[in-house]
Amino acid sequence: MPSVITSENDRLVKDLPARKRFYSGISEDGWALWIGGLLIAAVLLLAFLSTDFKFASPLYQWSFANELGTKIFTSKNLLFFAGIGFVYAVLSSIAIGLSGGNRGKYIAGFIVIYILAVLSLLISGNKTINSYGIEYVVFGLVIGLVLNNLNLAPAWLKEAARSEFFIKTGLIILGTSILFTDIVNAGIPGILQALAVVIVVWFFALWLSRKLKVDDEFGVILASAVSICGVSAAIVAAGAIKGDKKKLSYVTTLVLLVAIPMLVLQPWIIKRLGIPEVVGGAWLGGTLDTTASVTAASQLVGPLALKAGVIVKFSQNVLIGVAAFFIAAWWTLKKENNQKTEKQGPRIVWQRFPKFVLGFIAASLVFSFIIPAGTTKQVSGFLNGLRTLWFALAFVSIGLEAKFSDLVKTQGGRPALAFTVAQLFNIFWTLLWAYLLFGGILFSAPDIE
């Protein structure tokens, strides 16, 4: 009898690691794909089942203090916040738990980070603050930085600070709003500017990093952040080269800190120097890092600037997938050119390719060519709201992962210097191409009335 019990126990012990190995084998990219895809599929299913269903999102916008009680902190609005938070907590905690994380600590930390993320959205939702173009990403970062740098963030809170995971999931949902029809409508100017800026600024930033003796791993991540679309591009690049997460956190902090003065100063410069509105919008779209920041800053300039800015930013965003492939291929062939790599060739490139980008591309293709326009219009606002909440979680987490002292201590502050100089080059280079392509110099000024 004891031998039977022993053999049964042995079987269970063997089976348990096998199950654990199966779930732990799912990467962060894989979980982001599952969660992002599940959310998109659920929203589409509801839309198909009820074409008249109106998706409602939480309200963040308010003008006066009395509206906090009558508009923001109503039972209905708080229920929206709580419902989305509950769904996010359940889905993400399943992924964290099955990946070997401490689910209890994660859930406790997630609740706090979610509340802080919502707080950042509510602060930026104030009409006065919003008029200055300062968006939630700034407030989320600052809240996280203050807690971390004043040593007010306990270990259980940092357990839930999963900035990459949150950004990756949000990026997959972002794909639903990157429609190829919008890129086509942008015409030659928008596409050419995106290519001219991304290619030249990327290589300039990498060259400058090498000149300043910044290692190539750092250089690739910061070059991608400067040239394409900030934090999202940095995470894609880090995934493509399997980069150090500390270096990624360093770069993402720089991206958001440098973006603050740009959000305020660039619209002011456009008005002060009398830069044509459409040119100014194209300039903002090529230099600011998120569609939300482009929208906020462009609105300070005018409606033409808003349209031009969004067109250029969409054109750059769609390059994320292309950039991921080329960065993975370049890094593999140039930096790991040994016998093993030569034999495996494309297989190594595929292994390094950040798989969550496939979700971004798939979502974009599905919504561009398969989902009816009416359904897209029905669900777009709600999906954008879901994506914004994932991003808000990410930016609070970035602050919780970053230390101000690291900006100076890491490699003597040279990466920070390289990033800042590269961003200045990006600002002037993009302004030149905005004039050439949207100012009627190389082509007729695009008609985006």
Image (cartoon, grey):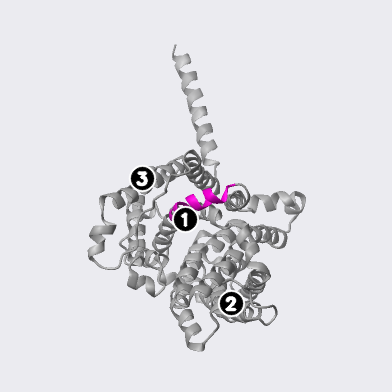
Residue that sits furthest to the bottom in the current view? 273
- Give the amino acid at mark 1: Asn
| Residue 308 drawn in magenta | no
Q: Position of residue 13 (x, y in %)?
A: 48, 28
Circle 1 SS class: helix
- The dominant secondary structure in magenta is helix
Determine contact: label 2, label 1, CB under 8 Å. Answer: no
Near-viewer residue (176 or 201):
176
Image position of 319 (left or right of 16): right
First in sequence: mark 3 or mark 2? Answer: 3
In the image, residue 365 sits, relative to residue 197, either above or below, namely above
Residue 411 can be seen, yes or no: no
Residue 314 location in percent, x, y? 58, 64
Q: Which residue is mark 3?
A: 86
* Residue at 61% from the left image edge and 53% from the top image edge: 368
Give the residues drawn in magenta, as a range.
371-385
Distance between the alpha carbons at the discs numbered 2 and 1:
28 Å
Please name the residue that numbered disc 2 is placed on.
Answer: 426
Q: Secondary structure at mark 2?
A: helix
Is 376 one of the magenta-colored residues? yes
Q: For the C terminus, give its image quadrant.
A: bottom right
Q: Which residue is mark 1?
A: 384
| Within-10-Å neighbours for mark 3: few <14, some 14–19, many 20+ | some
Figure quadrant of residue 316: bottom right
